[in-house]
Image (cartoon, grey):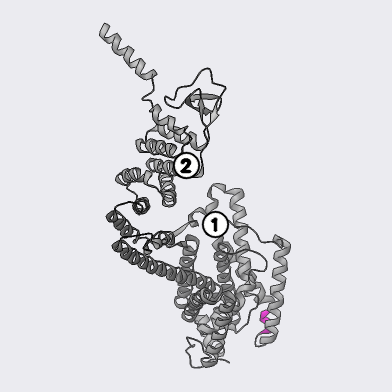
Amino acid sequence: MRALSYLVLAALCARAAPAFALDEGVLSKLASEDSDDKIAAIRHLAAVADPEGLRVLRALSREELQVAGGRLVIADGDRVLDAATGREVRPAPEARDAITINNRVRRELGGALAALRLFDPDRGVRLAAAQELMRIASPATEVLLERALEKETDREIRTLLSLARAEVGLKAPDPAARLGAVRALGASGSPRVRSLLAPLLDERAEADATVRREARKSIDAIDARVARAELLGRVFSGLSLGSILLLAALGLAITYGVMGVINMAHGELLMVGAYATFAMQGVFERFLPQARGWYVVAAIPAAFVAAALVGVLMERTVIRFLYHRPLETLLATWGVSLVLIQAARMTFGAQNVDLANPSWMSGGIDLGASVVLPWNRVVIIGFSLGVLAVVWLLMNRTRLGMFVRAVTQNRAMASCVGVSTGLVDTAAFGLGAGIAGLGGVALSQIANVGPDMGQAYIVDSFMVVVLGGVGQLAGAVGAALGLGVVAKFLEGWAGAVIAKIAVLVFVIVFIQKRPQGLFAVRGRCIEG
């Protein structure tokens, strides 16, 4: 019984006491006036990597570490804790002096805290710590980086940790260690890493010739990787712009190809689709807040129907009475565009409205070299291809598509064999307008939504249709994507204004040489 009593008493004492106490000799250096002593203490506490040491370092970063009667204490709200043991000090000492740190010590402290966060169970915390260490890694964090690399399984975090460790290796006194660090950094595509290697090309900064040669190779490899990433980024930006032009021009290709109508209000049909998306966002925020991230999906049919109804109304009330009178049609549809713009201003206001990207469309694909492919643009490209596939099936595998193609190639003959050309005109105009509304859905996720938003796309849409060939889906696809990519490359070299002028001049010259566009309409008779 006596032995059992001793065991219980020992267990209670062990529970009452702290698990361990920090070395007071190390802690006392944190209160030293010498920055080197403070840095040595910070490195020691970081290398031990225990919770009590982390608590002291956090208190130092928050200016809560103080000196009271020759001992270090932590001001924890209304309580005062002993820095070495973690026990509350009672009564709380009134005379306490705060420990101040300079920028040099603060940088060292920031690196130590970031390195300690590498062991957090939350991946997001570890990723943020690794990204921070890429900027502030120092020899003091090398041991923790090694330990973190041994335990880390996430590929992205391991890559960042390896680069941070290599940056530390650049400061090593051993040439072999610096050489290994230079080779490791050569696998990066970051411009910041290149700036770290650039000083090594100078004999005054790096005495070892082998390290200098390897630094040159690594810099060349980084430059090549950055160039490839930027090229891919420009191509992607061009495809993204081209996908928007494609959605804007698909409907125009159908209406212009079937009826030969120059619809100057086509850009406003994009605006109708965008405002339908905004209205659907309001519906979800009010009635389905838990699913508001999916308002874009629900906006697709809503925008198509809204724009199609506006298009049918335009065809029935204005355009039907102006066939084969292109100048009057152009002026009338321009007037309709002004009416639609003013209606949008009266309904939604003259200012742009706010649309939030859903969470599943946020972020992007990091290619390195500061090039990111945004998810919203990736989704838009996929959406454009999906719409294109549906339109192709509709035009080539349905009865309506057969009638549209027949009217496009020979309206008189189609009418003679029983095709209701008037009904086909209305259906084609509604379909083209609805597709423009889908373009407005896509445009709402990457551009400002306002009454005048469609004006910027009407000229580009006509250029796509004319360049691709009137009534030709394949031509519209090639022209839209081609013009988008070319425009983005020219913007990088000459600026947006010069790029737009150059594209317009190119289209004019091309049409002079090939009036039928990239793909000519095949048929025995084509109306002029």
Name the spot of residue 296 as percent of width and height, x first.
54, 58
Name the spot of residue 376 as percent of width and height, x first.
50, 61
Local secondary structure at mark 1: loop
At x 52% / y 33%, what residue is drawn?
Answer: 99
Q: Can residue 59 be seen in this view?
A: yes
> In screen coordinates, is 501 left or right of 118?
right
Sequence-first disc among 1 and 2: 2
> In screen coordinates, is 416 left or right of 118?
right
Nearer the camera: disc 1 or disc 2? 2
Could you tell me what secondary structure mostly forms the magenta stretch? helix
Q: In which quarter of the image is residue 189?
A: bottom left
Magenta residues span 318-322
Q: Is residue 351 magenta?
A: no
Local secondary structure at mark 2: helix
Q: Name the residue nearer the viewer: 412 or 297.
A: 297
Mark 1 to mark 2: distance in Å? Answer: 41 Å
Give residue 357's mark: 1
Q: Residues within 10 Å of mark 2 (few under 14, many from 20)?
A: some
Tell me the quarter of the image containing the C terminus. Answer: bottom right
Q: Name the residue nearer the viewer: 162 or 412.
A: 162
For disc 2, the marked residue is: 105
Tell me the quarter of the image containing the N terminus. Answer: top left
Figure check: 261 above or below 241: below
> In screen coordinates, is 461 left or right of 179?
right
Name the spot of residue 60 as percent of width and height, x first.
49, 35
| Disc 1 residue type (three-letter) | Asn
| Disc 2 residue type (three-letter) | Val
Give residue 98's mark: none
